[in-house]
Image (cartoon, rainbow, N blue to C red):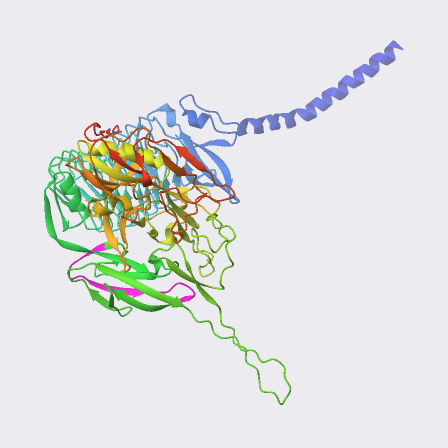
Amino acid sequence: MSDHFAEKTENKMKDMKKYIRRALPKLAAVIAAAVMCVPVLPQNITAAASAVDVYQFNENGFYYTISAVSGTIEASVVGYKSPNNGPTGGITIPATLGSYAVTSIGADAFAEDTTLTTVSIPQSVRSIGRGAFQNCTGLTTASMAAGVTSISENAFKGCTSLATANIPASVTSIGTSAFEDCMMLKTLTLPATLTYIGNYAFRRCSTIETVIIPNSVTAIGEGAFESCTKLKNLTLSTGLMQIEDFTFYRCTSLTPLNLPENITSVGRYAFSECSSLSSVTFPKSVLTIGASAFENSQYLAVAIIPNTTTTIASTAFRNAPVSIYGYTGTYAEQFARENSIPFTSYGSVYKVTFSADIYYASIDNISVRSRTGVIIPPSTVQNDEELTISATAPDGYVIDHITINDAPFTNGSIYRVHNSDVNIFVSYRFRELTPSVTTPEAPATAAPVVTTQVPQVTTVTTTTTTTTSTTTQTAPPAADDDPGDQDDPDDPEDTTVPADNSTQGSDDPSVSVDNRLEGIGDNNVRLITQRSNFISSATVRLSNTPQASSAAEEAAQSLAGDRSAYFYGFDISLYDTNGRENAGIMASGTVTLQVPVPDILAPYMDDIEVYHIEDGEPVRLSSSIVEDINGVKRVQFETTSFSPYLFVVFSDDGEIVTINEEEDPTGDGEGEVNVVTDEPPQETERVQVVVPGNVDNDSNSGNHSGGTGRLNPGTGALLLIGIPSVTLGCAFLIRKGNKEKRTRTKREIK
């Protein structure tokens, strides 16, 4: 048996040896294939290259990855190793690697390679990744073929020897800090395909002398050309809408500057410390000049400001020896006078306003064109200017007649400005519907019966008009069973929304006014804006809130100094259709408000100043007093902000004549007239404040007595809040000489 077992074991060993001999070649082939698929990374390859996935390959020193894009396999260069581990020198990136098209240069692919001197990028490459060549301090030339569309953030940042970087006519965007600190970059040509220049894109490129930004560019980021100290010649894109903060800060060689049309605002420190800048001309499109925009521009002698500019920060020209040139009666003249800046007038300008007699008419229904372009009321024009004025009617209405300064005007004709304002008024009437004729069945001997359906018409008074207080609609509304609920959009008696929006297209947002102001009599607030500025329907609410009153009091104290001040504080808020406060509904543009002169300030209306309270600081707005055809006078001002506002009148003699509210609670002017001096009001004085949303603020009810309003019988309640020195309508008397003006703190320069 032992011999049989030994023989059997020997046979098994022979079979195993045969199996191993047959399998060994196959196993070797598998191992060899696996080894070929694993890249051998050199020790000096970049961190980014050694961190890629298993699909990384090496060809001729270029390390790349592959990926499938829309069904096509593409390659991305992620690193490079020079032969024999020597200096990189000049390289040309191949158009293909491993038979795959090279379409991108990966993030940090060549970063920190100080031996790289030149690079040529093929047409197949579409994008240059984040930090791809960052801190390649030996790189002198970067040649990019047409095909590259985006240069990502930090792509060439810190390439301190880079003198030439041709940006091809395919690039659409240059990312944040893409060429920051390229201090030897002398030649910069931007293509007509470019639309966006990122924040700090060319900051501290201190040898660039000329920059021509093509008209295709619509946005330039903050600080994009900051500290380009050799920049002398600058041409800006006509596609720009605004110049961001610090964009050309410390461009110390910049010469006379002409800003192109379409720019609406100049940001903070945009041209600050441009010590060679001698003059700047603002186009009519510029509405706002930001804080310190030209501060410390020590040779700036001339600033030509148009009649359309409405806001200039008090520090805009600080420490600049500037003289302002503009038109008499404009905000530019007012700003110069308030800041002791010399002013030279080119002549007078006159206001263009538009009003109508229905709610649905808006600024979209009037076209005013001059020789130089479109004018959007309210605006100003120069004397002898010829205006082509055309009006249209909202859906459901036709134009009845047009007047300018109460004189008849033919629609579409030319009006020449002659030493007066241009007050355009359009009257509309309801479009007559085509009669519906039906012929019912009748005996042959009977005459046909004709039935004419004519809509029943009623006139509803509303405070939501852009111009006056009447609107016309079909079908008379049912009696309002809840007169105190003025926020119900389905209640045609309410005054905060139009009774019928059917005349407006579903894609055309409606903008209404919810007027909750006290102490303005029975007069309505007018709103003028473009519906296209709003992304959805909205309600602009004006109310005398305790918060607005408190902010107004503090602001007036800071402004009054050693003067007495009598003022009226209120809040402007924007609400969506769900009743939520949402200032984001207004995406662009401005609104112009015409607020009736408060009864308490009526004797001093010519001296009323308007302030917007921004972060606790009062910012003065351009304003004027306008009078409609009914003789109602209103304070008109333009704004983009929804927050506290202040009407204020100052008196240098320490006393203001006012109406005694205790003797005349209705504000009709029949009460006793007192002289109010700088004596402080009694600390026990209180005011009744109505809870917002529960006040019946019907402008025709005549119930604005004593400022208390009428409460909703279902949910209303009186909130008694003791606010010392508060009187009717949130008007206050500021004690003379006890408050110091607060100073605006200069924000830290980046």
Image position, residue 692 (x, y; %): 43, 40
Q: Is residue 251 magenta?
A: no
Image position, residue 39 (x, y; %): 49, 27
Image position, residue 578 (x, y; %): 49, 45
Outermost residue, top direction? 2
Q: Nearer the viewer, residue 257 or 466?
A: 466
At 28% from the left edge and 46% from the top edge, which residue is drawn? Answer: 599
At 38% from the left edge and 24% from the top edge, which residue is drawn? Answer: 84
Q: Look at the image and tell me whether residue 184 can be seen.
A: no
Q: Is residue 392 magenta?
A: yes
Outermost residue, right direction? 1
Task: Point out the image quarter for the C terminus.
Answer: top left
Task: Point out the image quarter for the N terminus.
Answer: top right
Outermost residue, bottom direction? 445
Q: Nearer the viewer, residue 13 or 589?
A: 589
Left or right of 357 in this view: 649? left
Image position, residue 144 (x, y; %): 33, 41
The answer to which image quadrant residue 129 occupies is: top left
At 18% from the left edge and 37% from the top edge, which residue is drawn? Answer: 655
Which residues make up the magenta segment? Answer: 380-397
Q: Nearer the viewer, residue 175 or 734?
A: 734
Is residue 352 placed above or below 314 in the rendered structure?
below
Q: Look at the image and tell me whether residue 617 can be seen.
A: yes
The answer to which image quadrant residue 5 occupies is: top right
Q: How many marks?
A: 0
